[in-house]
Each structure stands twice: as C-alpha cells, then as structure tokens.
Image (cartoon, helix red, strand yellow):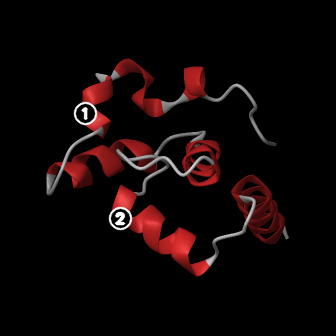
Amino acid sequence: MWVEDWTPKAACNADQPDALFVRGAEQNKAKQVCSSCPVRTECLAEALDNQIEWGVWGGMTERERRALLRRKPSSTWRVVLESARSQMQTSTNA
C-alpha cells in the first residue's frame, strides 16, 4: 500500500536533516538509515518525480538518481516504483 503522508513514518525523521545532505563516504552512512525505512519507496519516488538534486533520498545519492533519470527520463516514478513493489510482494506471497 502506498503511503501518501510518508514523511512522519520515515526512518530519518528523528535524525538531523543535515545528515542526509553529505558528500563522499558519509553518503554511505546516510544510505544505511534508508535500508530499513518503511517508506523508502515513497521517498525515492518523491525525489525522482520532483528531480531533487541534493541529498540521499530513498537510499539513493544524487548521482545515482541522475543516472536513473537519464535512463528513463519521462517515467512517473511513483507509478513505476509502486508497481514494482506490488509485483515483489505478490511474488513473495506466492
């Protein structure tokens, strides 16, 4: 199920916001916070659909998101990620 108001449920909600807007090796620490986040997909869709240029969102750095956007520039990422998550859940429950 897609969570519309995802920000209060984010794993990083208790962290300092600046912790997600770092460079270099510090980005790996920020991405670890995302690994167990219950709304990681919603966060990533937000960043991709709005082409947010800075910070770690949904477990991806700005460089990783730019590469993804170059490969599929006209995608509606919420639809793509929601569909992928539903397919994964269906195959896991089968």
Q: Gap in Å between the C-alphas at discs 2 and 1? A: 17 Å
Packing grade of label 2 (10 A; few <14, some 14-19, many >=20) is few
Q: Residue at x 45, y 66 (%)?
A: 66
Q: Residue at x 24, y 51 (%)?
A: 27
Instruction: Please indicate whether residue 20 sits to the left or right of residue 12 in the image.
Output: left
Answer with mark 2 or mark 1, whichever residue precedes in sequence: 1
Q: Residues within 10 Å of mark 1 (few under 14, many from 20)?
A: some
Classify residue 88 by image quadrant: bottom right
Q: Is residue 24 visible?
A: yes
SS at mark 1?
helix
How many marks the image carries: the answer is 2
Q: Amino acid at mark 2?
A: Arg
The location of residue 41, given as percent across then percent down, is 62, 50
Looking at the rendered structure, the secondary structure element under dot 2 is: helix
**48 relative to 21 in the view: left or right:** right
Closer to us: 65 or 2: 65
> Relative to 26, is 62 above or below?
below
Under mark 1, the amino acid is Ala
**Is 93 placed above or below 58 here?**
below
Q: Which residue is mark 1?
A: 19
Q: Position of residue 34 (x, y in %)?
A: 43, 45
- Examine the rendered structure and indicate whether residue 19 appears above or below residue 52: above
87 sits left or right of 61 in the view: right
Say which residue appears at 43% left-offset and 53% top-offset.
59
Q: Which residue is mark 2?
A: 63
Report the quarter where the C terminus lies.
bottom right
Quadrant location of the N terminus in the rendered image: top right
